[in-house]
Image (tube, grey):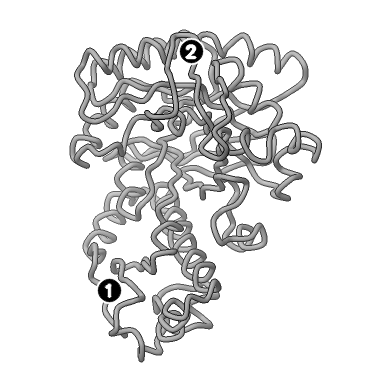
Amino acid sequence: MSFRLDAQDPYTKARAGVLSTPHGDVETPVYMPVATQASVKAISQEDLELLGAKAILANSYHLYLRPGTATIKAAGGLHRFMNYGGMILTDSGGFQVLSMSDLRKIEDGGVTFRSHIDGSEHRLTPGKVIEIQSELGSDCWTTLDECPPYPASSEQAWRALERTMRWMEQSVPVVRAKRDAGQSSLFFPLLQGGLFPDLRRRAAEHMGGLPHDGVSIGGFCVGEPKELMWSVVSETTDALPKNKPRYLMGIGTPEDLWDAVALGVDMMDCVWPTRVARNGQVMTRLGKFNITNSAYRKDFGPIDPECSCFVCRRYSRGYLAHLFRARELLVHRLISFHNLHLMAEIMRAIRRAILDGRFEQARKDFFSRYKSSAAQPA
């Protein structure tokens, strides 16, 4: 693994670099579409190629339960199973398991839970989580963690962090054994600490004493105010080494991309662009709007006149409004593709701005135009 920093913005913590992975180089900062169950919702792998998506995220928990790691391993690994040639980072599934309070039991040795699919009982340990990701054959592995809720006391957050750090330590020998056996996947252990800067710094210090290729920053977007989240994210990136990529988990609105990168984040993922698309929400450079609004029924202009994606070149707002009302499945693909295209374009603009030394001005220009719900019929 190598991570090369190509540029650093002089006024913020924004960085541009290149992460080398077993399935190609990934330019950072990067937004990764989410393929939870080996599929980005409503999007094909051919669509991912059109989008230029060099990195995606899949979820170990879901793939472990269905279709099962044995099936994916028999197919030749996750890349061949889903026929995707770029980098795949796998979330350990800890967040999904730990969020099911009525279906799981947390102990120091791991987590026992019942499948949300058929009720069968399973147990995840730090070592098993690495084993699962090894069988999947993903490029970047994360670790089992305990994500404290919001709000949580400092004592609750500390207990969760202690357990997360122990689980991280227990993962390291398994990762080493897999590498000794010939696997070259990257190790991105998960950093917790809740919304307490001192715990985040302690977590960063602990991780610094263990081998790792990058850092997965978890525990945000759990209900806290955005101002508090960004404040703690900033404290966290300050405590991390500059020569390792920082992956901020579950972050991904257009505004988030600019704000996270400004705080030194290199990698992000989020289901938001495709999730809101399935509810009819369209993203543009001026803000978002809902295609179900009656104003768009006879609006025959493109979703976004400034967008170069095939959806905006070929289909009108009025047509998409019809598809949504008629419950035609095509509309989910079209809006999802457009939303992901916008995310990719924004991230490319961010990277260019960093390399050109004008990130802060580009960020101001974006926010001067972007309003949360300002888009109007053409």
Real-space Cα separation, disc 1 to disc 2, in angstroms: 46 Å
Quadrant housing the C terminus: bottom left
Q: Is residue 145 left or right of residue 123?
A: left
Residue at position x 48%, y 57% in the image = 344
Q: Residue 359 at x, y = what percent?
A: 33, 50
Give the SS element for disc 1.
loop
Give the SS element for disc 2.
helix
Q: Residue 294 at x, y = what percent?
A: 29, 83
Residue at position x 50%, y 20% in the image = 112
Residue at position x 65%, y 34% in the image = 138
Bin the neighbour count of mark 2 within 10 Å (Cα to Cα): few under 14, some 14-19, many 20 and up: many
Q: Nearer the viewer, mark 1 or mark 2?
A: 2
Q: Amino acid at mark 1?
A: Ala
Residue 77: quarter of image: top right
Residue 2: quarter of image: top right
Q: Is residue 319 left or right of residue 174?
A: left
Q: Measured along the vertical axis of the image, is residue 104 above or below residue 90?
A: above
Q: Residue 325 at x, y = what percent?
A: 42, 79
Residue at numbered disc 1? 375
Q: Amino acid at mark 2?
A: Trp
Ranked by sequence position, the earlier of labels 1 and 2 is 2
Q: Is residue 62 left or right of residue 248?
A: right
Quadrant housing the N terminus: top right
Residue at position x 22%, y 42% in the image = 226
Q: Is residue 243 left or right of residue 358?
A: right
Q: Measured along the vertical axis of the image, is residue 176 above or below residue 254?
A: above
Residue at numbered disc 2? 167
Q: Measured along the vertical axis of the image, is residue 10 above or below residue 40?
A: above
**Residue found at the very far front of the displayed protein:** 119
- Between 96 and 142, the one lying in front of the other is 96
- Between 110 and 91, the one lying in front of the other is 110
- Between 146 and 207, the one lying in front of the other is 146
